Amino acid sequence: MNKTRVMIVDDEIEFAQPLSERLTLRNFETQTAVCAEDAMTLLRANWQPDVVVLDLRMPGLDGLDALSLFKKFDPAMEVIIVSGHGSTAVGIEGMRRGLFDYLMKPVEIDELVERIKAAAEKRGLALRQ
Amino acid sequence: MNKPLSKFLKATGGILCGVTADGAFCAKGRYQGLRRRLLVILLLIGILPLSVMASLSFIQYRTLLREETSINARLSAESARQTIEAYLQKLTTAIQIISDAYTFEDLANQGKLDKVFAKLNQDFFGVVDLSAIGPDGIQQAYSGPFNLVGKNYLSSEWYTRTLAKKMYISEVFMGYRHVPHFVIAVSKMMPEGQGHWVLRASIDTEKLDRFLAAIYSEVVTDVFLVNRNGELQNSSRHYGKVNDRFPLPDIPPMRSILLAEKTGKKSVLHAFGHVEHTPWIVVLELQGYADKPAWIASNHQGLWLFFVCTTLVVIIAFRVARHVAMTVRSADDERNVVLAHTEHTNKLASIGRLAAGVAHEINNPLAIINEKAGLMKDLLENMDEFVYKEKFLSQLTSLQGAVDRSRTITHRLLGFARRMDVKFEPVQINDVINDVLGFLAKEASYHNIEITQDLQADLPLVRSDRGQLQQIFLNIINNAIDAVGKDGDVKIISFLLNANHLQVDIVDNGPGMPPEVLENIFEPFFTTKNSKESQGTGLGLSITYGLVKKLGGEIFVDSTVGRGSTFTLIFPIIASAPGGALQ
C-alpha cells in the first residue's frame, strides 16, 4: 500500500522539519516547503501530496491564497491549516475555498495524524469517484 | 446617577463650582454661564422688539393726537375770530349807514339820536350808548344810560385815531363810566369842509363774553381777547379780568393762526388769531393732547400691556434658558458617560486584542517546542535501552505537559477574546462550565468563595458555539463571584428541563438586587459595580443577553435583597452532528 504523501508548507523550518520527521516515523511520506512558491515547485516536479499541512502566515502568498492555488492545481488535494494565528472569519473563508480542517498550533501529533488520515481518505474517495 | 458624574460630584464634595483652584473649568460654572448668555439673548430678542414697537406706537399715536389737537385748535380759533369779525362787521356797517343816512345836525338832535339808538339797540345787543361828537371834539348829543353831553374827547386817543382812519374800533378801556367797554366810531366830513364830526357807539365787553362763551367746549377750556401788549380785553377763566396781563408769546400774522404748546403740570395748547380791523388778538386755550382721556387711557393700556408682555417674556426666557441649559448639560453628561464607557470598553478591547496577539505569537514557539520535544521522544522510543533513556523520556513528557498547559492557556485567552476558532459543534454544557470554573477557581478561592456544582451527568450534547458559551458562563459566574464579594457560596446546577431544553442555574448568596435594578440589569451600560475596586462596563450582562438570544436560548434573573440572586439559562437541544469540523 502506498504511503500517504504529506507536504508541510510553513516558513518556520524549526516547526516544519521536526513535524516532517515525526510524520515520517508514523509512516507518512513527507516533504517540506517554506512558502507557496516553493510548494508549487515541488508540485510541478510531480511530487503530488495527498494532504497539505499549511501555515497561514508566510512570506509571499498567505495561507488562504496558497490554498486557492493548490486547489486550482489539484482540486482533490486536501488542505489542513495549522496556524498560531487565525479567526472565525479565516476559518469560514478557508471552508469556502475548500479547506478540510483548521487546527491551532501547538497541535497534538495524534490529533493531526487523525485529521491527515481523514483527509487522505476523503481524497481517496474523491479520486475513486 | 451615572458613575463618572457621581465620581465627579464625590470629588467636588457635591458642590459644583465655576472655576476650580487650579483654574480648571467645572460643570456648574459652564452651564450657569450658558444659561446667563441664553437668558440675555432671549431677553434681548423678546424685549427689544417689544420696546421698539411700543415706542413707535407711542410716538405715532402722540403725533396723531397732536395733529388732531392742532387742527381742532386752528378750527376753533378761526371760528372764534370769524364770529367776532362778523359781529363787528355788521355793527360797523350799521354805524356807517347811520352816519351816511343822517347829518351831524340830525344826530345832534337828542330826540332823533334817541330814536336811532333805540333802533340800533334793538338790532344789536350790547350797544350801551350812541353819541354824536362835533368837529370841536365836544359831545353834542348822547343817547344812553349816562349823561355825557358836553364831554370833550379832543385829547382822547380813540378820537384822534377815528379822525385819522375814518373808522375805528378801540381797545377796551374803562372810560368815564369806569365800565370795561370799547367803541366803534366813524368820522364824517362836515358840509362845506368845516372839519369832521364823529358818530360813536359804546359796547360793553359783556357782549364779547357772550359771543366767546359759545366757543367753549370739552377741549376749549378758555377763550378771550387780548391787545398786542397782552392786556385782557374781556374776562378770562384762567388769566383774570380786563386789563390783566396775559403772557403773549408772539404777535400772530394777519389772517393766520399761531399755535403755542405749553407743557407742565397741565398740558395746554394756545391758539392766537388776529381779529381784522381791531387791535385784538383772540386767544383760545385748549386741553393739550397729554391730558386727553384717550391719550391717558392709551398710555395706561400701553404700559400695562408692555408690563404684562415683558413679564411674560422674562418668565419664558428664564424657563427656556434653564431648560436649554439643563438639556445641554444632560446631553453632555450622557455623552461623557458614553465616552467614559467607550473608553473603558476600548481599553478592555485593547487588552483583549493584546492578549490574543500575545497568545498567537506564543503559539508558534510553543509549536516548535512541542514538535522538537515530540521528535526527540519519538526517536528515543525507537532507540535501544541506555542508562538515561527513561529519564530523558520522562523529561520530554514533562516538557510536552508544559506545552499542553501553555496551549490551554493561550487557547483560553483566544477563546475569551473571541478570536479563536468559533464554530457550531456538539458541545457538552457541563464541560464548558468546567472550563470556565477552571479559569475562575483561583479567583474564587482568593475571596473564600466556595463554588459547588450539581451537574446532571447524562446531559445530552447541544449543538452550539463553545467559545460563546464560555463567555456567557464566564460573565455570569464572574458576576456571581463579584456579587458575593467574600465568604459566600456560588452554586451551579445543570439539568434536563424537558425533551428539547436543558437548564443551568447559577445561584449566589450575595446581597441580591432590588426590583429597580432587576428591571435594567440587561440594559447596555447599566452597572451596579461603582466601587473603586470593582468597576464594571455595564456591558457584560447586555452582551451575555445578546449571546444567549443568538444561540436560541433564554436568560432570566430572580433576586431577593439580602438573600441572593439566581440566573437561569435555558438552551435548546438540537440534534448534534458528528465531528467537530466546520461544515
Image (spheres, coloured by chain):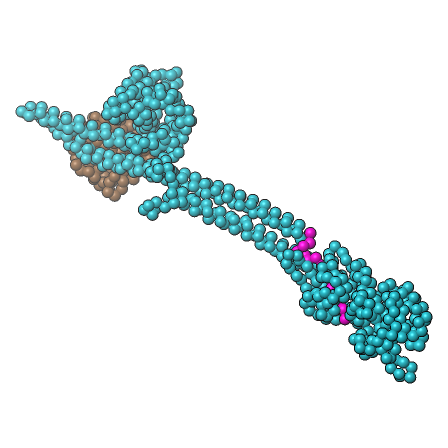
Q: What colour denotes chain B? A: cyan
Which is nearer the eye, B335 or A38?
B335
Q: Is residue B210 above or below residue B332?
A: below
Q: What colour denotes chain A? A: brown
B171 in magenta: no
Q: Is residue A34 above or below residue B442?
A: below
Residue B81 % position (x, y):
78, 65
Image quadrant assignment for residue B471: top left
Query: Magenta part of the protein: which range?
Result: B279-294
From the viewer's perspective, tell me whether residue A105 is left or right of residue B75.
left
Which is nearer the eye, B167 or A89?
B167
Image quadrant assignment for residue B367: top left
Residue B49 % position (x, y):
56, 52
State the residue at coordinates (24%, 33%): A82
From the viewer's perspective, tell me whether residue A127 is left or right of residue B65.
left
Quarter of the image that includes the C terminus of chain B: top left
State the residue at coordinates (45%, 41%): B326
Which is nearer the eye, B543 or B370?
B543
Quarter of the image that includes the N terminus of chain B: top left
